[in-house]
Amino acid sequence: VPEIGCLSIIVLGASGDLAKKKTFPALFHLYCQGFLPPNEVHIFGYARTKISDDELRNRIRGYLVSERSASPSKDVSKFLQLIKYVSGSYDAAEGFQMLDKEISKHETSKNSLEGSSRRLFYLALPPSVYPSVCRMIRRYCMNKSNLGGWTRIVVEKPFGRDLGSAEELSSQIGELFDEPQIYRIDHYLGKELVQNLLVLRFANRFFLPLWNRDNIDNVQIVFREDFGTEGRGGYFDEYGIIRDIIQNHLLQVLCLVAMEKPVSLKPEHIRDEKVKVLQSVLPIKDEEVVLGQYEGYRDDPTVPDHSNTPTFATVILRIHNERWEGVPFILKAGKALNSRKAEIRVQFKDVPGDIFKCKKQGRNEFVIRLQPSEAMYMKLMVKQPGLEMSTVQSELDLSYRQRYQGVTIPEAYERLILDTIRGDQQHFVRRDELKAAWEIFTPLLHRIDNGEMNPIPYQAGSRGPAEADELLEKAGYVQTHGY
Ligand code: BG6
């Protein structure tokens, strides 16, 4: 049932990169599709910089229109008119009192709708200020309507640096807001082919009997970027590729690939199963990790000269349960590599009693390409068309662009923000899930931070360190050709 009444979306950190590049464009697309009706919705930007409403609007304007939404400029102007700006610090009452006054003004003016008031606070901010900002919101900016409604907060990763700091952050926020009010974004959970994983696994009879250690040899979850940390060196160096990509984005994908069937599609049922997978992961072994750092990374003036932060990592996770015992889950992520791609590769075991002697041509493999160009394809053996009885590897290919021509795939942030408005937490990380994710990586991260493990240099634009390919081979992965 759609809720009626006014909705205030407050973007804190409104002049920062995340807000400009992701949050406001996502809101704009939702607006264009009618999800943010102008007679109900008002958007507030909040940040320290002292600028006017128009200055903020001008800063955002250029980011709103992308190739996928050639919206007319009249939509842009109308959307921008919904945005007001309030400046203030992140830890003092004054700014937040002012913000509350502005929100209330908007709510009063819309009260003709006689509905509840809904307040969504989007923290496009570094986590160091989450506790103080949450305290200020709690104290000054909560929904006060006696007609119902809610106050929700949306937080972005990184949620801490390790288990201890993440738990501390969770407790600080947890004292101020209840779990159903907290939306921890991992934008990979908003990607079309990540959301498709549950359907794929549990709505297809094909996969049900095959998805286990008897048939699957190894699983790879890969993230590659063909650019370095340009402009973000300062942030990145503090975190590194494991905290930036693997502990969150790739691990979330792993959960959806490996989890058991949930009791239902209720968010709590799904998240319960994800937590179980995480809790079944065995401690990571040093010999199943390869770290890399691209040459030239330290030339960035914001990166310390002797930084040992990895910009590349391959880490093997082993899930200790009945379904997955013995199957390596290879998580691989790197910056400044030879291509930009995110994909899941499920490689099946060899056919027993191979009468065609075709083992060398490759194995069955099921590939889910998350981006770019969403696709799923199965590599399989077929008879080479022609007079001879020989085999060749080919593909059954479901390429979204061809199959769903004319369908626009929503941006992850767009979908996730809509979920926060609707109150659907399925695609958000629950507190115990976050804790379990940090438990897996914290010992390894501490060893890296203490200089006990060092990254191997690799050339920018390459495949990453050769040692990573060797590790893959050792884990049982057989390189196949073609796509
Ligand atoms: C972010 C990371 O979470 O994800 C970035 O901080 C990375 O380093 C980005 O570039 C990748 O997102 P996407 O959607 O382009 O794969």
Image (tube, rainbow, N blue to C red):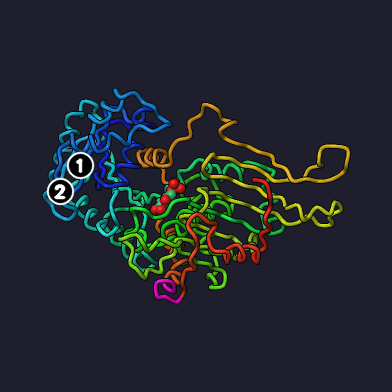
Q: Residue drawn 58% across and 64% down?
A: 466
Q: Residues within 10 Å of mark 1 (few under 14, many from 20)?
A: some
Q: CA distance from mark 2 to mark 1?
A: 21 Å
Q: Residue at x 58, y 50 (%)?
A: 344
Q: Nearer the viewer, residue 474 or 96?
A: 474
Judge whether residue 426 can be spotted in this image. Answer: no
Query: Is 353 rendered above or below residue 208?
Result: below
The C terminus, quarter of image: top right
Q: Mark 1 = which residue?
A: 144
Image position of 290 with respect to 258: above or below: below
Quarter of the image for residue 373 reads top right
Q: Is residue 145 left or right of residue 221?
A: left
> What amino acid is labelled 2 in the image?
Gly
Mark 2 vs ligand 1: CB below 8 Å: no
Q: Secondary structure at mark 2?
A: loop
Res 31 label? none
Give, as a single range, the part of the protein colored magenta: 446-452
Q: Which mark is residue 88?
A: 2
Name the residue furthest left. Answer: 94
Residue ID at (23%, 35%)? 58
Q: Nearer the viewer, residue 253 or 356?
A: 356
In the rendered structure, which amino acid carries the disc numbered 1?
Lys
Percent from the top left, x then y, of residue 155?
33, 51
The residue lying at 41 percent from left, 57 percent from top is 244
> Would residue 295 be found to the left or right of residue 385 on screen?
left
